[in-house]
Amino acid sequence: MAGATVVRDTATHGGRRHRRLSPLALAVSLVLGIIYGAYAASIARDGGPATNGQLALALISGAVLLALLVGLLLVQHSLPREPRAAAWGALTGAAVGFLVCLSGHSVFSSSGLGLIIAAGVTATVYYALYAREP
């Protein structure tokens, strides 16, 4: 996906450029939100019958991830490379840590795994941005 455009510039209003997401970026974000919410609900279900609380967990966690993804996609190009990499790392680490916490692990182990994942994603995104940007 080397040539795919995630954010498009639209008309300038009052000297500010407004950005909007491409349909592909919105579709991928929506699918990731749905999958994340369904997976969170399946972890919370733990083999028992489905409840309204698990449905609410699926909807809320999927909607929050969707909102955070869209928000980060909209502002990422205005961020320097280091904060952009840290933002992607923080989002990924928090999402993984939440799922691990739902599976019954302690807060310390889920936070630790989230921090490890966040550090790895931050380093990877920073390297990708450093290698691509002038």
Image (cartoon, rainbow, N blue to C red):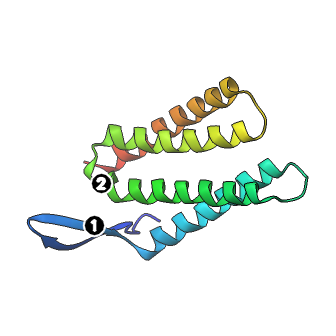
Front-lying residue, 77 or 125: 77
- Res 32 quadrant in image: bottom right
Q: Give the structural element (helix, strand or loop) at label 2.
A: helix
Seen in the picture, residue 72 relative to 89 is either above or below; the reply is below
**Circle nearer the N terminus (2, 1):** 1
Dots 2, 1 in contact, CB < 8 A: yes
Specify the quadrant of the image occupied by residue 71.
bottom left
Q: Which amino acid does label 2 sit on?
A: His
Look at the picture and state if 50 lies above or below 20.
above
Q: Can residue 124 be seen in this view?
A: no
Identify the residue position indicated by label 1 in the image. 19
Callout 2: 10 Å neighbours few (<14), some, many (20+)? few
Instruction: Find residue 77 and name its label.
Output: 2
The residue sitting at 90% across, 52% down in the picture is 47
Mark-to-mark CA distance, 2 and 1: 10 Å
Residue lying furthest left: 15
| Amino acid type, label 1 | Arg
Q: Nearer the viewer, residue 64 or 100?
A: 64
Q: In this view, does 8 lie to the left or right of 40?
A: left
**Label 1 residue SS:** strand
